[in-house]
Image: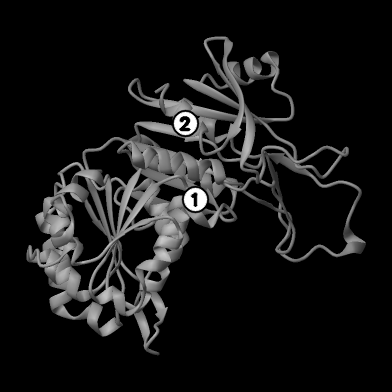
Amino acid sequence: MKILLGVCGSIAAYKSIDLARGLSKKGHEVRVVLTKGSLNFVKPEVFKYLGLEVYLPQDDFTHTNVLHIELAKWTEHLLVYPASANTLANLAFGKADDLLTSIFLAKRSETTTSIFPAMNTFMYEHPITKENIDLLKRIHIAGNLFIHPPDSGKLACGDTGQGKAPSIEKVIDCIEAINPKISAESKTVLITTGATIAPIDPVRFVTNAASGKTGYELAVEALRRGYKTHVIAGQSATTKLDSLIDLPGYQLTRVITTNDMKDAVEKHFSVSDIYISSAAISDLEFNANTGKMKKNDLSDSLEFTAAPDILKTVLTKKKENQKIIGFAAETELSLAVLNEKWERKPVDLLVGTQVHSGLCHDEQQAGFNTDEATYKFFSNGEIEFERTMKKSTLPAEIFNRL
C-alpha cells in the first residue's frame, strides 16, 4: 500500500520515525510530509537515512510539478501521526496553508485518511478541539476518514490523562485493518478464536495452547473487506485483538469457559451473515471443586463430561442465507478424519489445521501459537485445497470462497 505519513508539531513526532520504519518493514511504500511544527521535534535527514522520500512545507513551491496534487494522486492512505491541535483545526476548516493540508483537500474520495491526535489532555478535551474532531467526522460521514482517539496515561509534560499517541504496533495494526466505509448496513462476520478453559478447582484448569492469531488475521481480513466484525475470544487470546477496538465496525468480547463462549455465540449468531468457528474450544468439563483440591484428596483420575458443542448447536439454527466455516484442529488431517468431522457437522467449508502442542512424544509444536500452519480445506466430500502457509494469508483463501 502507498502510505503518505504526515507528521505534525507534537512531542510524539519522534515516534513517527519508528512508525515509518515499521510500515516499510511490513512491505508498504512510505513517503513522509513534515509540517513546520514537526521540524521542532524531528529532522528530515532521519527519514532519508531510512531510504524514504521526505517533503518539507516549502517544497510545494520549489517542486517542478504541482506537488500537493502529485502526492494526493499517489497516496492510497493518508496517515496523520501525530496530529496536533493546530493541524486538526486547519483540516476541519479546510485551510490549505501548507503542504499537508493542501494534500488533504486534494486527495481522491477513495483515498483512506486516518488521523491519530496526540496532545496535552486539556488541549484534547477543550471544546474547540472536540468540535473540530466532530466537524471532521460530520463532513466525512460517508467518506473515507477515521480519527483514532489518543491513549490515556502519563504525558510528556507530566500531566496524566487522555492525549498519548497510540503505540506504533497499534497504529500499524489499525492501518492494515481499517475500513471507514463500514456502516450499519454492512454484513456481519462472527468469529470465535483462542482457547477456552475448563476449571478443575479455583486454582487449576485444563486448556490448550491456542493463541488466537488465526482469529486476529480473520478479523483483519473481514474488516478490510467491509464486514462488521465481532470477535469472541478466549481470555488468553492475543492482545493484538484489542488493538482494533476503536476501528469502525469492530467489536471484541472476551470469554473464559466454553459455556461463556456458547452463550456469547448464541446471543449474536442470529444477526450474523457469516460465522467462523476458529476457536480451540475445550471439549471437557469438570465438576469444579469450590476450594483447592488438596494433594491427599487427589485420586488417580478426574471425572469429566463433554462440554457443549457450539458449532453443532449453531448448525441447528442456521438460516439459508448464512454461511458457516468450521475449523478442525487435528494431529492428522487425512481425508477420513475430515470427512468424519464434516458428516457430524456439515459446514459450508471445513478448514483442517494440523496441530501439536509439542509437549509430548518428542513432537515439534505445530499450529498452536505459531505464525504458520498446514491447512486442508474440505468441501463436497473432498480436499480442495492443501498448503502450509502463514496465518496472515489464510483468511484471504477463506473469504475468496464465500
State the residue at coordinates (73%, 24%). 332
Badge 2 marks a residue whose secondary structure is helix
Q: Residues within 10 Å of mark 1 (few under 14, many from 20)?
A: few
How far across and down, in percent of the image, does residue 373 sit?
64, 34
* Amino acid type of the residue tagged 1 in the rendering: Lys
In the drawing, does residue 320 fall left or right of residue 305?
left
Q: CA distance from mark 2 to mark 1?
A: 41 Å
Badge 1 marks a residue whose secondary structure is helix
In the drawing, does residue 258 fall left or right of residue 67?
right
The residue singled out by tag 1 in the image is 25
In the rendered image, is residue 266 in sight?
A: no
The quadrant holding residue 376 is: top right
Q: Nearer the viewer, residue 112 or 27?
A: 27
Image vertical order of residue 145 relative to residue 383, above or below? below
How far across and down, in percent of the image, does residue 185 sit?
21, 38
In the rendered image, is residue 234 in sight?
A: yes
Q: Nearer the viewer, residue 128 or 269?
A: 128
**Between discs 2 and 1, the one toward the N terminus:** 1
The residue singled out by tag 2 in the image is 314
How far across and down, in percent of the image, does residue 30 sit?
36, 52
Give the number of the disc on residue 2. Answer: none
Image vertical order of residue 367 relative to residue 16, above or below? above
State the residue at coordinates (69%, 14%). 336
Image vertical order of residue 374 relative to residue 246, above or below? above
Disc 2 or disc 1, which is closer to the eye?
Answer: 1
Q: Nearer the viewer, residue 54 or 85?
A: 54
How far across and down, in percent of the image, does residue 57 sit?
20, 67
